[in-house]
Image (cartoon, grey):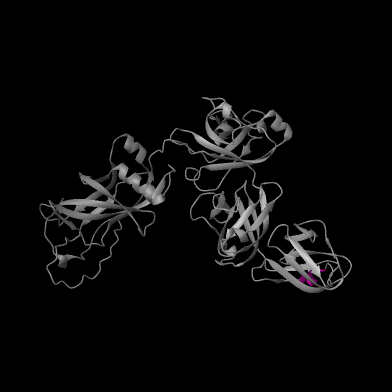
Amino acid sequence: MKKFAFFSILALGFGLVSCDNDFDFPNPPGQSNPQEPIFETANLEMTSGVNGTINLDQANNDNALVAIANIVSAENIPAGYELSFVGQMSESDSFANPFEFQTSVSDNVIYANPDDLDAGFHKLFNTLDPSEKTTNIRYKAYAVNGSATIRLGGENVYFCPMTATMTPFNPGFTVEEEYYLIGTCTNGTIDAAKAIKLTNGGGSPYDNPEFSAVINVSADEADNGYEWAIVPRSTLTAGSGTIFGVTDSELASERNGFLTDYSSNPAYATITEAGPYQIIVNMRPDEDGLCSYKVINAVEQLYVIGLGCDWDFGKAQILQTSNNITYYGYAHLNTEFKLTVEPNWQATAYGSEEKGKLTTKPGDTNIKVDQNGDPIANALYWCDANLVNMTYALTKINTIAIIGDATPGGWDESKEIAMTPSADFLTWTVKTTLTDGSFKFRANNAWAINLGGTLENLVQNSPDNIPAPITGEVTITLDLSKLPYTATVVK
């Protein structure tokens, strides 16, 4: 198969026959000293050795190497030299920050150790999820003779770019996509119609294993002990299977603890005081095989912390709620922000990795303020957040105006009177004339976002109009900097 000949640097640049090999042959600088010889790469032909998905877990269990490429032909390799290859793995075909792995060659087949491929898989994709993923692979080729190692073609020549789909090692546990609450809410049965679905912040549940649900325990339920346990979707679908209950019945009413398979310890967790609660479970087991849980009083409000308030909790706007599920309110936003359940970074913080989706994953997951391609979007926004569905929505406030029979334009929408915002968009003012009657504040020339009620307590979408407290020429000031939203009307 091999024809041996020795070539110097002058031979570099001859053709190569391979499976779509990619090349980058730079012009070498002038040489002042003799250079180590570089072997010509002509007629080194390689093909992918992958047929279907590479199951790294199975290969590891079988104590077997993985065949990843084949040498079809290799000519012009000097006598006494053997071929050697170093593989590179990357998420993309640009091979930015590739992971390199060693190979071995036997009977013209290139093999890799499954341990090395699994390490590369996890480094590239940064995940514990055992789902298969496709990687890009290419090879550096070397001619080796004892201590002499020479790269074929030079530093920028790679062979046989290919893709390979791999299944990584089994992590030893399973985290399903969906989990549900059963117990008192299902009358002690596995009832799919009554089970309460827990929500997740998005991404793979192996990497983001926290699930949560908001419940409201009535006084009667509390007196009897509101019981709850967790089941995965597979159990709910089958009507039987794994149930996660508390590890110790004596600790059933504790606010923090651990969950384990109910079949080994039949005990549900219990809530004995009425009120709204958020149940949060981490379904990725620890070293002892236990999942953790915590029960907290449902979030009373959310703090909007970001560049719009200079990342100062003392200036943060607040989103309110009437059901401990949906939260809403005005906030001055600029570029990015997060939502927190308390005015500090020790509390649970909600960010985002996907537009419109909330996550509690730590790290750089700030919510980006991006309206119609504007990455800065320094303005006032109406913010909506749902902690059950783990979603959010932002509506940029372009205008706020007064409208009503107490105003010169009456209820004619085309004659509403625009207000002027302050520099931080949290105070809006207008000089106008009021007569006997009432009015409302509305945003963006529409009724979707409007404030009514009283000047001392302005409420979103209130059915009540605001009575004009005085008549004549007045200055109206709307204050959106804190809750409740208020307004003043002065001569």
Q: Please state which of residues 7 and 379 is positioned toward the viewer in this rendering.
A: 379
Left or right: 53, with 78 as reference point: right
Q: Position of residue 251 (x, y in %)?
A: 57, 29
Answer above or below: position of 440 versus 296. below
Q: Position of residue 204 (x, y in %)?
A: 49, 45
Q: Quadrant of the C terminus?
A: bottom right
Q: Please state which of residues 477 and 370 is positioned toward the viewer in this rendering.
A: 477
Answer above or below: position of 135 versus 376. above
Q: Position of residue 282 (x, y in %)?
A: 52, 40
Decide if residue 481 is in sight here: yes
Q: Residue at x 47, y 42 (%)?
A: 206
Left or right: 325, with 46 as reference point: right
Q: Position of residue 56 (x, y in %)?
A: 35, 41
Decide if residue 447 is in sight here: no
Q: Residue at x 63, y 28 (%)?
A: 189
Q: Residue at x 81, y 70 (%)?
A: 490
Which region is colored magenta?
A: 412-417
